[in-house]
Each structure stands twice: as structure tokens, then as C-alpha cells.
Image: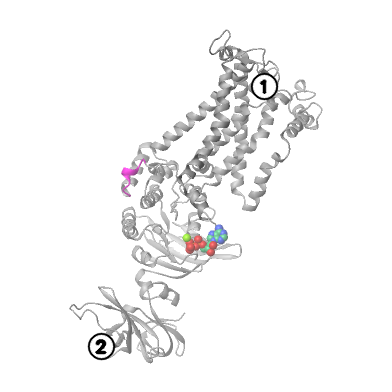
Amino acid sequence: MGRISQWFDRRGFAAMLIGLPYLWLLALFLLPFLIVVAMSLATKTPTAPPFSFGGDHPWVNGQAYVRVLTDGLYLRAFLTSVGNAGVAMMLCLLLGYPMALGLTRVSKSWRNILLMLVILPFWTSFLLRVYAWMGLMGKNSWFNGLLTDGWNLLVPMDWAVKSIPMMNSNFAVVLVMVYTYLPFMILPLYASLERLDPVLDEAAMDLGSRPWQVFRDVTLPQSVPGIIAGGMLVFIPAAGELVIPSLVGDASSPMIGRLISDEFSSARDWPMASAVAVVLLVLMVGPTMLYSHYQARAEGTK
Amino acid sequence: MQDAAEPFLRIEGVSKTFGSFQAVRNVSLSVGKGEIFSLLGGSGCGKTTLLRMLAGFEEPSAGRIFLDGRDMAGVPAWERPVHMMFQSYAIFPHMSVEKNIAYGLKHEALTKAEKADRTREMLELVQLVPFAARKPHQISGGQRQRVALARALARQPKLLLLDEPLAALDKKLREQTQFELMSIQARTGVTFIVVTHDQEEAMTLSDRIAVMDKGEVKQIGSPTEIYEFPASRFVADFIGSINAFDAAVLGVEAGLLRLSVPALGTEVLARGQSGVAEGSKVTLAIRPEKLRLSMEKPADGNAVQGKVRDLAYFGKDSLYRIALPSGVLVQAHAVNARRGDEGARVADWDDEVWLAFDATSAIVLVE
Ligand SMILES: Nc1ncnc2c1ncn2[C@@H]1O[C@H](COP(=O)(O)OP(=O)(O)O)[C@@H](O)[C@H]1O
Ligand SMILES: [Mg+2]
């Protein structure tokens, strides 16, 4: 016993505990990332693996980056990705915020049941759920039929349609992404809203604020960290999403994940795929680092 | 019906029930304009609940509240000219000290300059000007308390509710802040209702006190009235210390009551009390400082003999515990007026002493 506790008390142990996550990041994130960066600077060859250094470009080959930045295909794909992910994130926020707020306002026993319901969809296969949506959105489904009837009832005769073309569109991608990623928005929002002191709401009300003003002045500003966490948890994976756009998306305007996948597999252009991946990562990580930099500065001067 | 004598705040038969639990029972009281009124009682006696009904966070289960002649029923918290200083202060953690204080002014029809002036004035009132830009986590507990006070006062409420305003401060700061609160109240003229469980605090701060127990108001009066003329054994015990004995009324003599007190082993005369019939059982209560201690038998008046059992010397006064022949212990406070090597105390351990008291300082309690 004594020896074990001694071992735990050693300073080295604390250092190891702190070091472990860094080690993890180093081995499983930084190293692979460096490999990808290296690949992105290589030249495509018909060998296995299908790239090499040297040849026409003796040291590194920036050709892939030039194409990423100049070829309209990639630019459009980036824009589609960011657009779809951004819309999905906003919709998740609009849907998730009231849900998270509601969760903090119900009794303890209800809260556990409702939280359970939020994560319940994870218990069935993700693919199964996407296929279910494909079925719902299809031309012959009752869901599409219902929406079509509603549409036809509301609009003038000559706008009437036989069915609403929902499948293979950005609408479908956003819809399924919102459905899939909503829990990732709700949970961090709930965590940050749940910590707020309800007495602060009363204090604001006491000082003359109506309930909506209390929300605007007290609840919302204090939940900004939750909004940012939820927003990033939705936006980042949504922007790189591959499965949803391949299954329900519009093939003529692919998202960036689809391009990476295509370059790697069908085109066998690994340097190109790597270059796209690196640019995507920079686009995602850049704003995050900027945010945390300003966050740290704001806290330092407070 | 509203006549000139309508009090500023009138609480009329207010009760509050949570489920089957009655937190406030049939409370009726009036508070005058500019008064410091305390609600004093032990923890859980319903003080905060009563305050929350005044602020508009809870609706009374029964009874009515009138403020400045207006029935407050159904008036939401944000429309009441009443502000509250919360027990936990409830300062907005994401706003600076200045923003916190200015928060209530958002809803006032004032120009930007007027708002800034008012905020400045409040910062000066609570001496927080150098801390205006700080965030709440960067100031001390005492400063947070003052932010809460300034924020509540900024909108110039008619009535300020303070829930245990000093409870979170340490002893030294508490005493200093007490006087600060009183001076701020005097300068602003705002009516204060202060909730406290600390009887000394209530005695120091208040113009009048309502002593509460289990949701009920037991007695309302000035600190002196509550102290000198407690209406019940509960109030007598709660405020200060007191010697209480069971007694029986033998008769009425010239406005005084003649009591037989078995514990004292003698008959005594006590202050008359209306509605006390001959033969009824009462409680005789005497404050320790009303007992005069002497070595010789006093010439006349109420007197009993006992032996000094315990003695605590506090410098300016001493507390004696004296055993009576009946075995009962009595507490007596004596001021140490004499000076000298051995004269500081009136009596010493095991001395046989006499305790005398005036009939007018002997309190007869019916309840
Ligand atoms: N919202 C509520 N629901 C149920 N019981 C409550 C509620 N608020 C207060 N009580 C109860 O009412 C009693 C009085 O509470 P409170 O007014 O806070 O007492 P005090 O402030 O005098 O310590 C307590 O027993 C408390 O448990
Ligand atoms: Mg309380």
C-alpha cells in the first residue's frame, strides 16, 4: 500500500499525467498530420504507394496546392461545405437552444428522461438513420406525399407539383446533418446553461427586466461558451462530412469530404487529396485558434 | 378607502403554503415611509419567503399586500417599485461592477448622461469608484455586498428588501457595514426591510423589529419595546438572555402584581399586566442586568439570597451565576464601577449575596 501511494505522490507521476494527453496528440494527431503534409508535397506516380519525392520536382512539389487554390472545383466544394455546415450549425443552434434551456427548467426526474431521449438516436446505427431519411424524402414516401399535399394546398394551381424533389440536394444534406448533429449542440449548451444560477434571473427581473430581457441580458451572454463549443462540435465534422452528402447530396456540387475521398480512391492522387485535407484543416483550426487566442487575451485583461 | 393614515407598506393577513407546508402564517404588519424595519427570526421561519412575496417572486396563498396604497396582487416583479438585495448578492458575473450597478437603469426613461451620472453617484455612495471596471470575481466579499446594494438603490426604489445583508461578512466588517447601511439609508431615505437572524444586528439597525417564529409574527415593536416588554417567553428568550421562572398570581396591589414564585422561595411584586387574573399561572422574567447584587440585605423591595456559583469577569462588567436555595441558577450582570486591587468585583466565588430587583423591571409573561 505504502509503496503504491509513494509512487503516486512522486512528482514524476503528476508530470506523466499531464504529459499523457500531449503524447496522445503527438502520436495520433501531429505525426499523421505531418505525414499528410509531406504527402501533399509529393508527386503523384503510378507506383504503390502512388507518390514519390524527386523526379521533375527534386525536393517538394507545390503543384497540388496551386490546384486547390486555383481550380474552381475545389473552391466551390469548400464553399458548399462551409455553407451547408454553417446552415446546419445555425439550425442546430436554433433548435437546440430552446431544448437545452427547457432541460434546465424541468424537474430532476424529467430531466434525466429527456436527456436520455436526446442521446437515444445514437443507439441505432447512423447509416440506418440516414437510410430512413432517404426513404422519407423519396418521391413515393408518405412523408413526401404529406408535404406535397400541404404545398399544393397553400400555393396557386400552376405551382402544384407531383412530389417535392428533396433527395440529392443541399436541403437534404442540411436536414440530415441537423438531425444527426443536434445532440452535439444540445449537450454542451445544456452543460453551460445548467450551471447558471437561477437567482441571477430573479435579480434581473427584480431590476425591471421582463423575461425576454432577462434571457437577452443574463442567460444568453453567460451561455456563449456553450454556444461556441456546440457550434464547433457541429460545424467542424459537418464541414468534412462524407457519408451524408454521398448518400443524400447533390453529386454535381460535391462537398469537400467527397473530393478528398475521390482523390484518394478513384483518382489515386494522394498528394492532391492530402493538400485538400491540409487546407481544410487550416480552415477549421485557424478560426478556433484565433478564438482561443482572443479568449485568453480577454481573460488576461479582465 | 385611503385615508392619510394609510401606512407606506401594509401586509394584511398574508400566508404562504408550499404543498402542505405553511411557510408564512397570517402575517399582518405595517411599515412607515423611511423606516428601517427588521424581520428577525431563526433559520427557516419564513423570513425570506415573506420578502419574496414583497418582491413579487411568490404570490401569497392568502392575504394582501399594499404598497403606497396600491394592491400588489398580480403585479409582476419587474413592475414593482421594490428592489431586493439577495442573500447571495446575485451579482451578474459577466458584467463589470459599473455595468452591474447600471443594469436597472436600462429600463428607466433617462438620457445616457443621466444614467452615467446616477451610476457614478451610486459608485461614490458605496465607495467603489476605483473598482468600477473590475469584474465581480476580482473584488472582495464586502465589495460585492456593496455592489449589490448600489445596484438595488440605483433605480431609487420606494422599498428596499435586504435578505441577510451582512451574514456573509466576517465579524469586523459586519459591524462596520452595519453603520454604513444605516448612514446610506439615512441619506437616501429609502424604506428598508432587513431580514436577519442576528438579534444584535436587528437591535442596532432597526427602527422597529418583527420577531418571527415558524412563519408567524410573534411581536412587533421598537428594539427597546421588544427588549424591555417582550410579549411572550419566546421573544424574551430570543432577544438577549433572561431569567424565567414559573409563577402564580396572588393578587393585584396598586397596579402591581403580587406573585408567588416557588423557585425564588418568596413572594415578589412585578409590573402589572392587563388581563391577568388572580390565581392564573404566568412566567416571571428578569433580565440579568436588572438584578442588583449586594452583600447586605437591601432595605426593601424584591430580594432573594443565593450563593455565587460562577463568575465571569469581562472587564467593564461581570456575569454571575447564583444558586438559590431552591437549587435554581440565576444569571446576573453587574457593572464593575469600582476600581482597585480587590474592589473590581462585587462578590467572589461562594459568597452569600442578595439579589434585588424593581417591580417595574420584572416582566410578567402570560404566554
Ligand atoms: N419554494 C419552496 N418550496 C417548498 N418549501 C419552501 C420553498 N421556499 C421555502 N420553503 C420552506 O419554507 C420555510 C421557510 O423558508 P425561508 O423563508 O427561506 O426561511 P428563512 O429565510 O427564515 O430562513 C423553510 O422550511 C423552507 O424549506
Ligand atoms: Mg433566508
Whether ligand 1 has any atom under 8 Å from the Cβ at mark 1 is answered as no
Q: Between marks 2 and 1, how big is the CA–CA gap?
A: 106 Å
User: Closer to the camera, B136 or A48?
Assistant: A48
Q: Is B213 a magenta residue?
A: no
Q: Residue furthest left?
A: B340
Up/down of B60 relative to B149, above or below: below
Up/down of B102 relative to B364, above or below: above
Q: Which residues are magenta?
A: B126-133
Taking A20 as reference, is B274 left or right?
A: left
Expressed as whole percent of the image width and height from the top left, the position of residue B277 reads 45, 87
Quarter residue B104 falls in = top left
Q: Is residue B245 visible?
A: yes
Crowding around mark 1 (Cα neighbors within 10 Å: few <14, some 14 to 19, many 20+) is some
User: Closer to the camera, B6 or A117?
Assistant: A117
Q: Are marks 2 and 1 on the same chain?
A: no
Residue B295 has which mark?
2
Tell me which chain the residue with mark 1 is part of.
A
User: Closer to the camera, A235 or A157?
Assistant: A235
Amino acid type shown at disc 2? Met
Which residue is denoted by mark 1 in the rendering? A261
Amino acid type shown at disc 1? Ser
Q: How is the image coloured?
A: one colour
Expressed as whole percent of the image width and height from the top left, the position of residue B102 reads 40, 43
